[in-house]
Image (spheres, coloured by chain):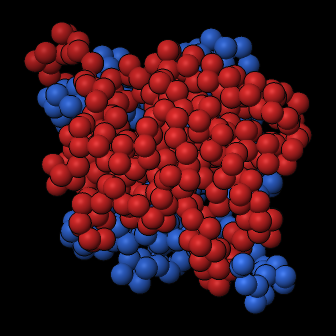
Chain colours: A red, B blue
Amino acid sequence: MASKKNGSKNDVDARLAGLCPNQTKSFDLKDCKPNAKPFSIGDKNTDRAAVQTLATEIDVLQNLFYADRRYKLLIVLQGLDTSGKDGTVRAVFKETSPLGVRCVGWKAPSENERAYDYLWRIHQHVPASGEVMVFNRSHYEDVLVPVVNGWIDASQTAQRYAQINDFERMLTETGTVILKFMLHISPEEQRERLQERLDDPAKRWKFDLGDLEVRKQWKDYDRAYDALLKATSTEHAPWIVVPADSKTHRNLMIATLVRDRLASLNLRYPEDDPRLKGLIVE
Amino acid sequence: MASKKNGSKNDVDARLAGLCPNQTKSFDLKDCKPNAKPFSIGDKNTDRAAVQTLATEIDVLQNLFYADRRYKLLIVLQGLDTSGKDGTVRAVFKETSPLGVRCVGWKAPSENERAYDYLWRIHQHVPASGEVMVFNRSHYEDVLVPVVNGWIDASQTAQRYAQINDFERMLTETGTVILKFMLHISPEEQRERLQERLDDPAKRWKFDLGDLEVRKQWKDYDRAYDALLKATSTEHAPWIVVPADSKTHRNLMIATLVRDRLASLNLRYPEDDPRLKGLIVE
């Protein structure tokens, strides 16, 4: 169902274009509405069912992706606290075996990690052939936190953008497909979600008072995101801004784009070993 | 449902005891019937529904396990080709987010890995606090393949058993819960599954002619498994032999034991930060 209604390349391009003008080139984050639902195909139940269908398709495609071995897939999820990175992983890969998708949740670098360049630890976790890797946060934190806090200046920041673009170009030139999603929520939606986290005893342990400090820097993060999206949305690894005030829409949009990208690769099983033909196991 | 029928510790112990005499101490693999179904609670549909219920419970417990942070969980899956290691991971963690469970599928060591001791690469992938790690094959391959092929002698093998026991004792003493499952299938069942793999175009690429060579060494592997089970089933990390001719029973048994072990830890959320009480997000 999702396949039919949401499937054609032109249709998806139109939805993306309607979302943020020139989504893959230069665009302003302020023109992207966190509560937009360009990928919605009906009411919430219809959209949820479509996510489930897409998750099943992604499971089939992941198996084929692994068998094919020509590509590596790197999915980068960025977004402020409560923007739904964890929820996205759960929904999009709901039907995929844990054997078929790896996730790394990037935290602030340790003392040992800080002794290396900031891409050192990232490089160790890029996907191998046939692998699907999800980065929950990523090297983009290194052009967010230090920028907002003034630890690096404009010229160092520009240098990092260029280094990241070079790094990602190398990865794509050596067989990695990179999908970068920026989960875009409104400050109002974040307030509700943080309050919910505080009020639910099963979620309260996730609450970090530091999150409120980051929330106070909302405008600074907005500016830093806007700048990095402009600087690092490249031909080989474009950014996709995902309106994320609606969890269902966020899942539907990302699942659609992951499914479409996998489907576009024309994946195939390796050729049969001719010795296997008609073989009977004894 | 599964909780009630399959839940009490005594009940599970009785099922294990009926399966292989002295399952956790010294036992003979030949006394363990691959087609036994000690954990079955009804017909196939009932058992399947129970696996699904258990998978949902395991998801909830994994969240709590992560929040609690006092333990690490290492699940080791061993078994001959087609014994169902991949299928087990998919079924048992069907409802768990990919963020909550990591898997490593161990292959023959690379040239670089062989330049180190055989536990070197293993140690790098043990779970951290709050993590669930599944080993699909493991360091136990190092007391199987070299033994069957005569690359190490009896005294070297005995030394490795002792090294593995020491290594696992250290892990358990530092907070790791280790669950080791040996998926036990019959040669007849393996023949059927290998033939099925050959006959299905979507599975044929997984077929390796080398698998047939290993199949010819069935008795040698049986002997090597029997010896390692006797030597490395310790108080701190006992082996559990899982009759695996029935996929549903295999899933049900392993999901039951994983759920029970997690439930036995009396996991809890960390204590609330008193500063969070009554806090309103602005």
Q: Where residue B192 sits: x, y (%)?
A: 19, 36
Q: Where residue A165 sits: x, y (%)?
A: 61, 24
Furthest toward the bottom, the residue is: B278
Asked whether B53 or A218 is in front, the reply is A218
Q: Where residue B222 sits: x, y (%)?
A: 43, 34
On screen, residue B281 above or below A2: below
Q: Which image quadrant is residue B112 in?
A: top right
Q: Is residue A250 visible?
A: yes
Left or right: A273 in relation to B154 = left
Report the number of discs: 0
On screen, residue A31 above or below A34: above
On screen, residue B78 above or below B98: above
Q: Where residue B153 sits: x, y (%)?
A: 63, 19
Q: Which image quadrant is residue A111 in?
A: top right
Q: Is residue B87 visible?
A: no
At 55% from the left and 19% from the top, the residue drawn is A169
Left or right: A12 in relation to A233 = left
Left or right: B252 in relation to A185 = left
Asked whether B244 or A93 is in front, the reply is A93
The quarter of the picture where the N terminus of chain A appears is bottom left
Q: Which image quadrant is residue A62 in?
A: top left
Asked whether B255 or A241 is in front, the reply is A241
At 36% from the left and 43% from the top, the residue drawn is A17
On screen, residue A117 above or below B168: above
At 28% from the left and 30% from the top, the residue drawn is A264
The quarter of the picture where the C terminus of chain A appears is top left
At 75% from the left and 24% from the top, the residue drawn is A159
